[in-house]
Structures are given as structure tokens and as C-alpha cells.
Image (tube, grey):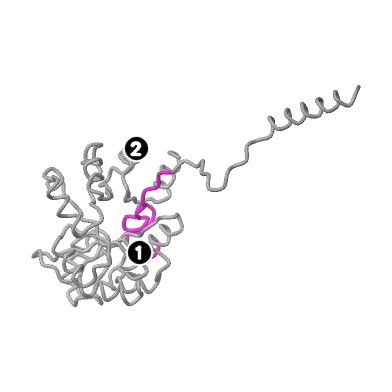
Amino acid sequence: MNKSSIFYLFLSMLFILSSCTPAVKQEGENNSIPTYKPLIIAHRGASELEPEHTFLSYDRAEKDGADYIEIDLRQTEDGELVAIHDEDVDRITDGSERVENLTLEELKHLHVDKKQEILTLQEIVEHYGDSVHYYIETRTDSDGNIGMEEQLVSILNSKDLIKKKRVIIESFSEESMKKIHELNNDIPFVRLLRKAEVQELDGATMQHIKNYAIGVGIYAGSVDAELVRQIHDYNLQLHVYYYDDEKKLTDKMLDLKVDGVFTNNPDYAISEVGSLN
């Protein structure tokens, strides 16, 4: 074989080798596909698995990977903020009375399942500090009056939780949200809407809500694709809550790409989100 033949053979081998070499990813090139990840909001903690609004429930939610622990607030007769959903203690304790008619000391003597107790908001933030995110619902008293807002902001500020962006406030009461906004306008709000309010939701209302809130909270059974589109058109987030139908409606909500889901079982909700990606 002469020198010329050897040279052309060498060039041919280089061509074959280069065609088999995988392409090198260029700097800055991104071939990844964005994944959908709504906020996982632990409804009263992992309340399907542990007594609601207790350290057991919140610990389980944190362990299972919830983004936020949800806390329903009510005010005692002596003005303390406690984590309890119902207006009375009948369902979750061995007592029977409205929360607002009991002192904190009286509440602490009531028994909750698994040797737990009713917690104050102060106890919760002292326990977890800034290691978790808090999704807190304010409520009015039985006469529809607000009254917990200044104490709430004070407790959150005691641990710098607002400054560290560890808190979202939710409420059905626009008055409560506006009061908190006067005290500290750095807190993101989610306006909870009842079914009747959802039926009357229009552009003017959504624009009004956008003046003080980052999103709306709506019962999942009232949500469809058109409602999601309308809310997103106003650059508002949509967080959905359930009644006793979480397992029935979760997949539909995830298909609609809502921005956050309340869940009684964070491990279940996270698993359902994971199955989509």
C-alpha cells in the first residue's frame, strides 16, 4: 500500500469515529423539561394519620415532606391564640364548650387523642421556629368580629417568620386580611372563597382580590378548567381544599395544574404529584 492510500484510509477512519461520538452538550444548553410541583399544604398537619393540630400531626407532615403546615386559629376567652378548627371542642376533646368561652388553662385540661393537647400558636412557633413554613387561617368570633390580628403578627415577628418568608395567611375574612396588611404588608395572603362567592366570581372581583392577595383558596369540587384559566389570567394562584373527598378529587386537581393542594396525608399527595412527572 502506497503513502497516498494510507493517508486516505486514515482520514476515513477519523470520519467514522467522529460520526459515532455522542454530541457534547453546549454550555448553557438545557434539555430538561419543567416539572409540575404544586404546594403541598398539610391540612391541620397530617390529620388523616395523627390527631389534627397536634405536634404528632405536624411532625408527621414535616417528615413526609409537606411544604406548609396549616394552622386554624381561634381565640380563647382570655385572648390566647390556639390551633383548633371547630368553634367548639366537642369533636376533638372530651370537653363540650365553645373555644371562645374557655380560658387557655381550661383548654389545657381537656384530653386529645394519643395524649396530645390543644396547642397555642406561640407553642407551635417556639417548637418549630423557621424550620417549617406556616399556612395560617384567621377567623372571626361568633359575632363576626376580628380581633386576633395584632397578636398574630406579634407572635410571627417574635421569630422573624415574616421577614424570613415562612408564612402565608389565609382567611374568609377580607377585613382580617386588610387589618394584617396594615400591620405588615410583607405577608402573602390567600383569600378563601365559599361556594356562593365562587359562583359570583368575575373579573372585577379577581382584580380587587389581587390588590391584597397572591391567590384564592377554593373548594376543589367547584373547580374546573375554565375557572383555573380565569384565575391564572389575573396572575393569581389557586389553592384547593377538600371536604371528605380528597382521594376522589386530587387527580383531577393535579390534571388542571392548580398551584397548591391541601391534604390530610402529605405522603399521599406527594406520591400523586410524583406519578405525573
Q: Which residues are magenta?
A: 35-56
Residue at x 50% of width, y 42% of height? 32
Residue 255 — which label? 2
Q: Position of residue 102 (x, y in %)?
A: 19, 72
Secondary structure beneath label 1: loop
- Label 2: few (<14), some (14–19) or many (≥20) C-alpha neighbours in 10 Å: few
Along the viewing direction, whichever of 38 and 44 lies nearer the viewer: 38
| Residue at far front of view | 4
Q: Is residue 8 above or below residue 254?
A: above
Q: Which mark is first along the chain, 1 or 2?
A: 1
| Residue at far left of view | 143
Residue tagged 1: 54
Disc number lying in front (2 or 1): 2
The quadrant the N terminus occupies is top right
Q: For the stretch drawn in magenta, what is the main secondary structure?
A: loop
Q: Position of residue 174 (x, y in %)?
A: 15, 60
Residue at x 29% of width, y 73% of height? 108
- Label 1: few (<14), some (14–19) or many (≥20) C-alpha neighbours in 10 Å: many
Location of residue 100 by image quarter: bottom left
Q: Give amino acid for label 2.
A: Asp
Q: Position of residue 270 (x, y in %)?
A: 42, 47
Indicate yes or no whether the magenta region holds residue 141.
no
Q: Give amino acid for label 1.
A: Thr
Secondary structure beneath label 2: helix
Q: Is residue 4 above or below residue 69?
A: above
What's the distance in space between the residues labelled 2 and 1, CA to CA?
32 Å
